Image (cartoon, rainbow, N blue to C red):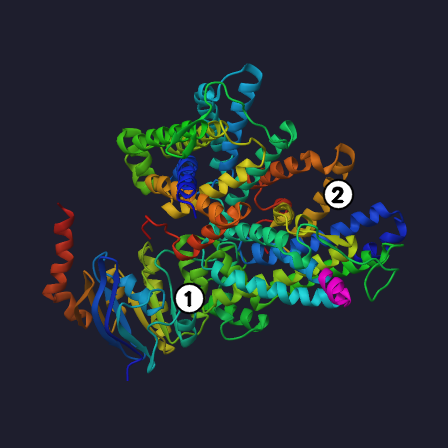
Amino acid sequence: MFLPELAQSLLSGVLMGLIFALVAVGLTLIWGIMDIVNFAHGDFLMTGMYLSFWMYSLWGIDPLLSLPVSGIFLFFLGVVVYQLIIRRILGAPMLIQIFATFGLMILMRYVAFYFFTPNYRTIQHTFLSGSIDLGGIYLPVPQLAAAAGAFLTTGAVYVLIHRTRIGGALQATAEDREAAALMGIDTDRMFTLAWGIGAATAGIAGSLLSIFFYIFPEVGGIFGLIAFVAVTLGGFGNVAGAFVAGILIGVIEALAGHFYDPALKTVFVYALFLGVLFFRPQGLLGVK
Amino acid sequence: MSLLSISGVAKRFGGLLANDDISFEVGEGEIIGLIGPNGAGKTTLFSCIAGYFPVTSGTIVFDGKRISGLPPEAICRRGIARTFQIVRVFKEMSVLENVMVGAFLSTSSRREAEAHARAVLGRVGLSGKAESFARSLTVSEQKRVQLARALATRPRLLLLDEVMAGLTPQEISEAVSLVRTFREDGLTMIVVEHVMEAVMPISDRVVVLDYGKKIAEGAPGEIVRDERVIEAYLGVKHRASH
Amino acid sequence: MLAAAVAYPFVFRKPFPQDLAIKIFLFGGLASAWNVLGGFTGQVSLGNAIFFGVGAYATAVVQTHWGWTPWVGMVLGMGVACGVAFVIGYPCFRLKGHYFAMATLAIGEVFSTLFMNWQWVGGAVGVYIPLRDDTWKYFQFGTTKLPYYYVTLAFLVLALLISEGILRSRMGYYFRAIREDQDAARSLGVSARGYKLSAIGISAMITSLGGGLYAQYVLFIDPPSVFPMMLSIQVVLLAVLGGVGTLWGPVLGTVILIPLSEFTRIYIGGTGSGLDLIAYGFLIVLVSVVQPRGILGFFRKGGNA
């Protein structure tokens, strides 16, 4: 165990974890406000990745610049998904709710598969390249930039939820839908907003990720899973919890890769997930 | 010896002490009314008796054997049945099938279960609706389905949780007569109610809870005049006006 | 209808229609098996491929490692699958709906990865079942599909008979009560845990038998072919499309979807294109939003079986 290598792993874990955190925040928003598990969340991320990729390949737009476009597009996609699909299954039995977002996940993933082929793509950089040397530890600039972006976006969402009136309305709806409705809060609008923001955060995370990660149709699978684990760990509906959990998972995953076989990293995440489900379903920070 | 014996039962949820040192006895064939303001802990007590919550302390003894700590299905098999405050019928099953689920407790034959279920439905006056889906019934009919279903398990003790809420005066008096016929069959009952006109006439004794504690116990006539009970209910009105 | 099924292979003598029918029977049985757990009892498993794979591997491995007949392997597979089902079910049934589904998904993936790395059963390479001349003892037929046809037909019939038997019995009532309202069921003396375990055990055993039959039909298995998440999803889709929780729903869904997917595969392009999966995804969403009761839902008033 070499300390600098360990520190390297740890730090990359944190950087990646910030991205996990962003994805998780969007998922927990949706989950918390309407108790619906969005199986397609990872595929919103995938959509953001491909958006950035194509804007880069076709028009040479740097991912950092296409970020807002990604965010806006995914926001509207989230709204559309809510209006067309989710709204109609709000009162449906759980099987159907699972099915609906699950089907959406498959639909999105394989549309991407069909139109974009399963080939792995990457974005070569314009102005973000190289790494920063911190006394023997190398932090690649792309990852750093992505992590910073994720941190800022998560912060923005947090401020939105906890310091604005609209955020207050969202929280109220999450806590007690009927009471909020009685206070004049339009539940449908809140749900729509939640889906919009949730999808947008995933899309932004995707665009940030596209700076240094491979872009391929199934990428939503692993990030979606990690988002679930993070949300479960952090307590569903809990934005701060999802943030902390996301970083935690990034670190755990990095450490697992460091001490064991990197190929088994995913199994670790699954195992962690199952562990949380069994032993602490209310999350580390949640209330039962 | 009493059929049900509740001794020093307390139930705590985190910081909230929902039931605090509650003790009383229920004799065989008695009807006990359990009343108290909202939030007094009545449904929590039922859930403890029926096994949905483990008691924090105290014991519950039924028919000479300890039942506190057993799971709900075991308690039902011992002879205690309950209805739920918010009606929980099996929506996608017919009324008859609902009651058959209860009837299957004592037999594994579908024919026998069906026969028994139909008999119980006749008792509560729902024979005409046997084939209807439970979700198509009115709330008061669903309450009767719940009742029939619980009865089909042939209990010795029946816990009725606010069965009268939302009923018209006509329906209430029908329900009261129905409860009286159960007693004639030897069924022991604990009835939680807010509707005073319903619970006072049928109860042999009344237990009053307030803020999780038992504050009074006695015949209906005494309870109505008991100062502590009046205070508890009036106090609620005072609190509500703030 | 049974008579028609029996006569079918003599009318359609070409391998393709027979192969299609075999697939329909096999998937129909798998969908019915899932239906026992997911439809009747309301426990949505997104990982039934686990049991399929276990059955397939058990059947294959007893031949390659010990030279036994596949029939023994199938029985063994059923036992192992049942055991696995209990091990999975015991902790997982404590979880609420969504979480149970996600847990089965995660466990399915874990199994897939596990078998990919388990060298004793061939790891990523898979298992080739030794080829033999036509034989009942080793259940292999190279020259004709007829035996496969009748055996898989029997499999489907078995699955349906078991489903029907359950529905008419106390167990079926209890399963449905658990699906509707578990706590209310417990208040009536139904041991929720016991019955849920029974449900997953039955589902697992039937599914694993199907896995064994599959192994003998294609004579080669590897983790992606018998443990994929897609298989778990497919099985659920078939049952839900036809009518979740009903007796004939899974069969109906299979009869509609399997031929459709086979034909699209042949005429529109290879499995690599993802088009069939796009269709699956779309169908799943459509069913959820428009008619959650499945096709049979258009014909039934009221609730499920």
- Residue C63 highlighted magenta (yes or no): yes
**Are the residues flagged by discs 1 and 2 from a single subunit?**
yes
Residue at point 54%, 53% (across, down): C107
The correct choice, above or below, for A273 with respect to A87 in the image is below
Tell me the amino acid under the disc marked 2: Pro
Q: Which segment is the magenta one?
A: C60-71
**How dense is the environment of label 1, judged by Cα within 10 Å: few (below 14), some, or many (20 and up)?**
many
Q: Position of residue C174 (x, y in %)?
A: 52, 64
Extreme bottom residue here? B1
**Secondary element at image label 2:** helix
Query: Which image quadrant for residue B24?
Result: bottom left
Q: Nearer the viewer, residue A16 or C96?
A: A16
Q: Which residue is mark 2?
A: C259
Q: Which residue is mark 1?
A: C187
Q: Chain of mark 2?
A: C
Majority SS type along the magenta span: helix
Q: Is residue A220 left or right of residue B138?
A: right
Asked if the residues shown at circle 1 and circle 2 are in contact, with their CB atoms under 8 angstroms apart, the answer is no
**Residue C49 visible, this orientation:** no
